[in-house]
Amino acid sequence: MLKSFGIISGFLFISQGKVNSSTENFNQARHALCILFPDSNSGVNGVVSFSQEHINAKTKIAAVVRGLKPNSLHGIHVHEFGDLSNGCTTAGPHFNPFEQEHGGPLEKQRHVGDLGNIKTDERGNGYLAYEDNQIQLYGEYSILGRSVVVHAGQDDLGRGNEKDSKTTGNSGARLACGVIGLASGFKNLQPYK
């Protein structure tokens, strides 16, 4: 039986579009959610949560993704657009407002949207949890209204010799994607067995 995911404390609100920066409260905690849907017939789905206590805090990221290849690594990124009108293709490139080369999530030089890899278990269920100092839920460089994409292959973190290494991590086809929306009423994402 596949693991499922749950959202603690029930009520969920996903905004449409970006928050008006002139009315933002930069000291109020923010939470965002992204429900991942399969691209074409991949069968991959999941959820990603983002939580940031205030504008200067690191952002907590948690993801649960199902339907991936067992015992493998898959690239996961925030992409520039929240447009999924033609599947994951219209999500555009990685979110990269500072025009950096592709890198790993803990590196200083990277796309803001570079989240690295999600590791799967023997059943093809992937889990990711860490804190990121470049992902923002506030201000001009917020990820709200953008998308998350899970890829078919491992992200080489910009260290490979392939043509796409410095732009996409050579992580392959897009398997699942979803739009990141502002959420309220949940504390964190918990994987259930």
Image (cartoon, helix red, strand yellow):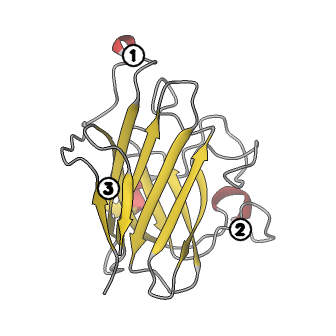
Give me the residue at 58% from left, 36% from top.
58
- Disc 3 crowd rating (10 Å Cα; few below 14, some 14-19, many 20+) is some
Callout 3, which amino acid? Leu
- Residue 171 in percent (x, y) is at 60, 70
Q: Secondary structure at mark 1?
A: loop
- Residue 84 is labelled as 3
Which label lies toward us, 2 or 1? 1
- Disc 2 crowd rating (10 Å Cα; few below 14, some 14-19, many 20+) is many
- Residue 126 in percent (x, y) is at 48, 72
Of 159 and 64, nearer the camera is 64
Callout 1, which amino acid? Asn
Give me the residue at 35% from left, 52% from top.
34
Give me the residue at 49% from left, 25% from top.
54
- Residue 191 in percent (x, y) is at 38, 66
Kindly identify which residue carries mark 2.
156
Give me the residue at 30% from left, 87% from top.
1
Question: Alpha carbon of mark 3 to alpha carbon of mark 2: how far?
Answer: 25 Å
* Disc with the residue nearer the chain's start (3 vs 1): 1
Which label lies toward us, 3 or 1? 1
- Please say if 58 is above or below 102: above
**In the rendered image, which quarter is residue 29 located in?**
top left
Kindly identify which residue carries mark 1.
25
